[in-house]
Image (cartoon, rainbow, N blue to C red):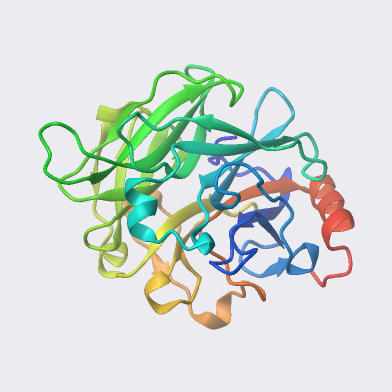
Amino acid sequence: MILSVYNSYYSGYLMVHFIGEEPDGEQVYFSYSKDGLYWKDLNTGMPVLKSDLGEKGVRDPFIVRSPKEGKFYLIATDLRLASGKGWTVAVEEGSRDIIVWETADLVNWSSPWAVTLGVSYAGCVWAPETIYDKVNDEFLVYWASATKEPHEQVRKQKIYCARTRDFRSFSASEKYIERENNIIDTTIIENNGTYYRYSKDETTKNIMVEQGASLDRDAFTNLSAPALEALLGVEGPQIYKFNDREEWCLIVDHFAEEKGYLPLITSDLESGEFQILPESSFDLGITRKRHGGILPITAEESSRLLKAFGNTVNV
């Protein structure tokens, strides 16, 4: 699904996320919101999906609705820092796989499977996300990899991509975004034929914004966003449109202050102007929400989720 046009068909939101480096923190957790700002933990704050593949833990889960198949795919980073490996090893000698689940109803999920997407010289594959490319009728999947090419003295974080229709067979991976600085955590949203890319500048530790007329790598130009440029110590941007109005919410993981997600609001993506919400205007629930993804869902899907994972919570 491309999150673009107002559609009252959706009445709630599912957030998929991890919670931290505690023993079970690097797995997939679910949270629900009726309005996109006040969230409740589902499944009594326990993980809904757990990976026993690869590093036996996942971070940065992202969920997408398939527009033709009537199913959903969830993809995540194959990484578990709780194993004690440390960040240097994770960057330079990490997994080149992503972990994938699928479901038709958000309740009954397949077993996970792993797909190797990282190029042979990649040290990691981080924060995979995807957007449906309606022009080519396929999903563009993109992620960050630390690579050292022949002309480089040290590894550098860049965004790579591949294309798929079923999340099992993929095109060859290729470079998608490279900047002078290290770049990770890209997310993309479309509105009225324009695509907006939000990425973390891993060198300056803030969010940069670009806009483009297509998903092609060379179609994007920088978009000034003063509030985001001034907000330091953040990562994991996610952006979604409110179901009931012409506003968008960008959430960023305020990792430097260990506060979890911070929401910012805009009524005009092209303007690049965002307003940070005061803490009294949102509630992220009990568990700490770390880098994840948000999916608008229907009333039927909301009811099914709450019945399976949290029908006693006050939402």
| Residue 94: percent from left, percent from top | 41, 46
Judged left or right of residue 113, residue 226 is left
Q: Is residue 309 above or below residue 92?
A: below
Q: Is residue 50 above or below residue 67?
A: below
Give the residue displayed 67% in from the left and 76% down from the top: 286
Q: Quadrant of residue 102?
A: top right
Residue toward you, 175 or 314: 175
Residue 199 picture location, percent across and down:
34, 50
| Numbered marks: total | 0
- Residue placed at 54% from the left, 30% from the top? 115
Quarter-of-image position of residue 19: bottom right
Which quadrant of the rendered structure holds the N terminus?
top right
Q: Of 239 and 268, which appears nearest the observer? A: 239
Q: Position of residue 205 (x, y in %)?
A: 28, 63
Q: Nearer the viewer, residue 58 or 139?
A: 58
- Quadrant where the C terminus is found in the figure: bottom right
Q: Is residue 224 depicted above or below 165 in this figure? A: below
User: Horizontally, is 292 left or right of 192 in the view?
Assistant: right
Relative horizontal placement of residue 61, taking residue 32 as reference (left or right): left
Residue 108 position, x and y percent, is 82, 41
Residue placed at 10% from the left, 33% from the top?
151
Identify the residue at the far bottom of this view: 280
